[in-house]
Amino acid sequence: MNSDSTEHTESWQPVIKDGTVAAGPICLGYLPIGLAFGVIAQKAGLHPLEIGLMSLLVYAGSAQFIAVSMLDSGAAFVPVVITIFMVNLRHLLMSSSLAVYLKDISKGWLSLYAYGVTDESFALNITRFRNGNWGWRRAIVVNHTSNIVWIGSTITGGYCGDFIPSGAFGIDYALIAMFICLLVFQLRGLLYMIIAIIAGFLAVVLSLVLPGNSYIVIASVIAATIGVFLQKSKIFIKLNGNQKPL
Amino acid sequence: MKTDYLIIVLGMGIVTYIPRWLPLFFLSNRQMPEWLVGWLDFIPVAILSALILPCLVTAGEPRQLELFRPELFVAIPTFIFALKTRSLAGTVITGMFLFRLVEMFL
């Protein structure tokens, strides 16, 4: 595989191959969720093409579920749009984190990249970027492969979702398993483990008391900030002296 | 397609795109202070943990603590499998298989 610097000149063929293969776990996870979304949206009175349009323009799983339930109960433009904005604010953090790895790319490509930032594509690509053998073009292929599967599965769900059995092959667990593995990849030392524990604990507690999914952003920001202070503190440097990565 | 629907979906699309686009457009290709790079380096591990744990130990609307869930049972061996093998595809398949197994017996 190639580093960022050679990726600009490389032909697209190996890039597309690596990207689509890497997107596999995401696609596996999007398929059942997309089908389920299609079924629900169709029952809420949306035509499969309207469903496809939403998946194309919004491309955000949980936000789309929320939007459909709001539309179904007759909500107006402003409340729907504000809710969707709040639900997707977490992408602000993800794109900021990705920006560290996306250098020397034209503004046009960056704007295209931004379209494909989801929880799943972010988690997968940031892990690969961090490992060093990943480039922005492969990451964009991951984004768009996932995007195509999402749009396709939501439309399919809108047409014939009722005929697909739910829960087959444990597919409902695909994304959770992927996140667990990507979390393991991120545990690169004691400090990262401490941050993960703080973030997870805060997220659970906050999810019980705060409405919506604001707990994700709040827990992550607090945990990462504590991480920065811990990294600077003398006690931690001493403690971490002979720590091996997991 | 109804115009009302089109306008709502367009509005949703714009407010979803902006948080994805702003940081990439303005932070990439820019020298960031060291503390910010360090902070952003901790964001992935924090977000992943914040995304996963509530899925494993809470349920319902509004959310309530619920520790005896197949999601949590399966997460433990899945986590260990990921730790030992470091294989993404393997972990996804193992997790799915175990989840199916647990669901069949519950």
Image (spheres, grey):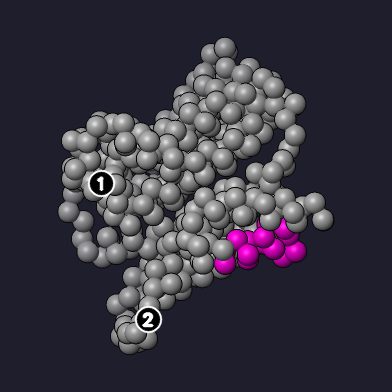
- Queried whether the magenta region covers residue A177, the answer comes back as no
Which label's residue is closer to the chain start, 1 or 2? 1
Label annotation for residue A243: 2
Q: Quadrant of the C terminus of chain B?
A: bottom right
The residue stretch that appears in magenta: B63-80
Is B82 placed left or right of A134 in the picture? Answer: right
| Amino acid type of the residue that numbered disc 2 sits on in the rendered structure | Gln
> Residue B57 or B21: which is nearer the viewer?
B57
The x and y percentages for residue A65 are 61, 36
Is B106 placed left or right of B97 in the picture? Answer: right
Is A43 placed left or right of A197 in the picture? Answer: right
Residue occupying image coordinates x 65% and y 23%: A158
Disc 1: which chain?
A: A
Q: Name the residue beneath numbered marker 1.
A: A2
| Amino acid type of the residue that numbered disc 1 sits on in the rendered structure | Asn
Is B48 placed left or right of B18 in the picture? Answer: right
